[in-house]
Image: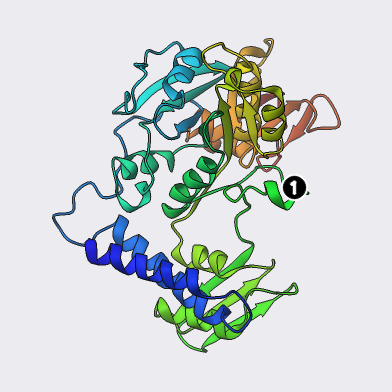
Amino acid sequence: MSTVMQKIKDIEDEMAKTQKNKATAHHLGLLKAKLAKLRRELLTPTTKGAAGAGEGFDVTKSGDARVGLVGFPSVGKSTLLNKLTGTFSEVASYEFTTLTCIPGVIMYRGAKIQLLDLPGIIEGAKDGKGRGRQVISTARTCNCILIVLDAIKPITHKRLIEKELEGFGIRGYYPSPTFVVEEELVVALLNKEPPNLTFRRKEKGGINFTSTVPNTHLDLETVKAICSEYRMHNADITLRMDATADDLIDVIEGSRVYIPCVYVINKIDQITLEELQILDRLPHYCPISAHLEWNLDGLLEKIWEYLSLTRIYTKPKGMNPDYNDPVILSSRKRTIEDFCCRIHKDFIKQFKYALVWGSSVKHKPQKVGKEHELEDEDVVQIIKKI
């Protein structure tokens, strides 16, 4: 383990000393590929006795979505869980009060959202320090991550936690493609879209590299160097974006997860209005005071927005719609077929057609098939085969 750590440190030192320009792009790409392989080796050791590598806490996933609280010790995660869910998680003035994962449930807009209070992580968690592996492994199973920061601590803590999550293969993204950040100062490094590129291995023919957009970061030699590090000498690679070496490595590794992240700035009651206005420049952020219960409603709105859930109401034949118990779907999987499978996996076998009321149809009701995409708060009545 120490040998792998030393190799990682040597590569990081060499990357820090190397200037970034077109002449060194090939060399830097090769170093990044080696670094990604070493990190994977560190997190998933190949020896038989390496138990628990990359394993999370044993918490059963329940409800319609899972949200995890991630942050350094004593930033107010347990207080936030207590206020939002009513679940007891020990709160104290010393660090590492929470030593295991404490689950709670939020009932919001008809959805059941599981909230996890995870133990505080320390710098170097991605390399196995503390209980970092367990914390971040559990965070990988979440539908949304709340990165809890202390308003009175340096804002550089934000980048430190991002580095830990990125080192464990978590790539956050904002669910709306229309989000634009104008100032380079506040660009979120964690929240980004999955790379729009295609990587397909083949048996022969060498490396075939094409791009549909102007590319400023990758060239054929850099791509070949990265592929050779993974012992891949025959592949078709198509870029539909100005991808970097990191994007290509993420796709080759295949173990990256893209999770929406919200930066929750806690303890704003202890800073001035001017300091709060500076923090307001951060994207994807929500200021709160968990102790005084300031802006917790705003945080719940933010969580709902980033989870991007869709509520569908059911209507039994000859009866009024049931508005009290909606079926919750992801905005990426909200067809009639997804709706049927959410109720029961065998339900789609008896499906004939559906009647839909709501914003997804022109007529009310409208007869639709299983490919029809639903919108939030649509009403659906399923007609089964006789």
The three-letter amino acid code for the residue at tag 1 is Val
Task: Please state the horizontal and vertical placement of residue 225, each as a whole percent of the image.
Answer: 49, 82
Task: Please state the horizontal and vertical placement of residue 191, each as a whole percent of the image.
Answer: 60, 47
Task: Please state the horizontal and vertical placement of residue 80, each as a whole percent of the image.
Answer: 49, 19
Query: Left of 277 or right of it: where is 193?
Result: left
Query: Against 366, is 157 above or below?
Result: below
- Foreground residue, 12 or 336? 12
Q: Residue at x 82, y 24 (%)?
A: 364
* Quadrant of res 371: top right
* Quadrant of res 236: bottom right
For residue 109, say whether it is visible: no
* Quadrant of res 216: bottom right
The residue carrying mark 1 is 181
Query: Left of 303 or right of it: where is 98?
Result: left
Quadrant housing the C terminus: top right
Quadrant housing the N terminus: bottom left
- Foreground residue, 206 or 347? 206
Extreme residue in the right direction: 362
Task: Please state the horizontal and vertical placement of residue 63, each as a whole percent of the image.
Answer: 47, 25
In what element is the residue under mark 1? loop
Q: Residue at x 37, y 43 (%)?
A: 137
Query: Left of 38 or right of it: where is 265?
Result: right
